[in-house]
Amino acid sequence: MSNEQQHSKRTGTDRRGFLTGGAALAAGALFSPANNQAQGSTQPAQGRPVPNQGEFPVKAISSANGREATRIAYELLTKGKDTLDACVAGVTVVENDPNDTSVGYGGLPNEEGVVELDSAVMHGPSHSCGGVASIRNIKNPAQVARLVMKTTDHVLLVGEGAKRFAIANGFKEENLLTERARKAWLRWKHSLSRSDDWVGEMGAEDPDITAAFNGRPTGTIHCAGINSSGDISCCTTTSGLAWKIPGRVGDSPIIGAGLFCDNDIGSCGSTGRGEANLKNLCSFAAVELMRNGMSPEEAGLEVLKRVADNTPDRLRDSNGRPNFGLNFYLLSKDGRHAGVTMWGPGRFAITDKDGTRHERSAALYERRAAPRR
Ligand code: ASP
């Protein structure tokens, strides 16, 4: 029996008891799924009804680079596939895409030119999770993270240990550095200083390399899904901050930061400046705010405000606002969803009964268009 199954078996009733007892007391009048089921349908979560069993609005949301991921995840969700398997299948396509320089194969490397990946998964129905950090030469870290969750008693494996675990489980070791990513990395090295031995502006004439280089590129994919039973899972996978110090781990593989879900409340995941998220444990905080009655959008904007308040001076612009990007993607059990961003305009991807599309994220701050001369 897997850890996940053991966990579900062990905690099914305890967990419910906790939610209707301790958590409810802690948060005041709380939305209680156990009560919902007992009473048939629509016990409000601070005023919001949840759907009947089997009638939850099926949807998958992700960061803007995950349109195709949400389409795939949604299709699997509607076919009755496990919610986490659906999300992992979605992000696998992006991990395999050499043109997405923020995730998996083709991701931008660390300062030594080596691609290091971070990923974590969380399965709502069993409240289990797994992650890998700083893993090298393995293209699909989200699948490895899912195996950590399913086949070990651990939550997070890092570096060499994570790679050996993946290889032992049949994953192929391969070079993840594409030519495009290698050239973008070299261009970065050339741009560092005028007083070193790298001369010229390597790759400046190549628009493709310039696009991949783009200063200090960031990016990640988070994908979350809810099925018609109201089960929720999510995963986050990334090559992390480009040109990072080897061994640097961002927010993506850290449960509570890069992602979190509570099957009775909802989920949240992030992209953007991982260090800011790590200092505020934003995904966990956002789910707790939803537990206390906030909508996904309100919860996401509230955690962004906390990040803004806690930002050190060296990371503020001349108006005192954070000079970095941070985004959250949120789902709530009652069927609502939102994307929020520190700096708008921003967008996220979604597939639901109305199709696959981008929607606009709510922004804490809006970037003004450059004034016309
Ligand atoms: N959150 C990722 C990290 O800090 C990077 C990103 O999403 O841009 O590693």
Image: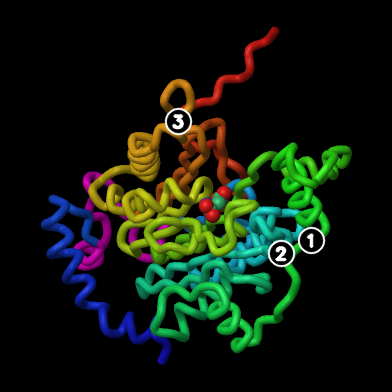
User: What residue lies at 73% left-to-right and 67% top-to-bottom?
Assistant: 176
Q: Which mark is residue 316?
A: 3
Mark sitting earlier along the chain (2/3)? 2
Q: Which mark is residue 105?
A: 2
Q: Are marks 2 and 1 in contact (CB under 8 Å)?
A: yes
Mark sitting earlier along the chain (3/1)? 1
The front one of 250 and 96 is 250
Spatial CA span between label 2 and label 1: 7 Å
Spatial CA span between label 2 and label 3: 33 Å
The front one of 309 and 129 is 309
Eyeballing the image, is 40 above or below 310? below
Secondary structure beneath dot 3 equals loop
Name which residue type carries label 1: Thr
**Quadrant for the C terminus in the image:** top right
Q: Residues within 10 Å of mark 3 (few under 14, many from 20)?
A: some
Residue 221, by quadrant, is: bottom right
Residue 190, given in percent of the width and then of the height, sits at 77, 44
> Main structural element of the magenta stretch: helix, strand or loop?
loop
**Stretch in magenta:** 33-56
Q: Which mark is residue 33?
A: none
Name which residue type carries label 2: Tyr
Secondary structure beneath dot 2 equals loop
Residue 209, given in percent of the width and then of the height, sits at 81, 45
User: What residue lies at 50% left-to-right and 33% top-to-bottom?
Assistant: 323
Secondary structure beneath dot 1 equals loop
Name which residue type carries label 3: Arg
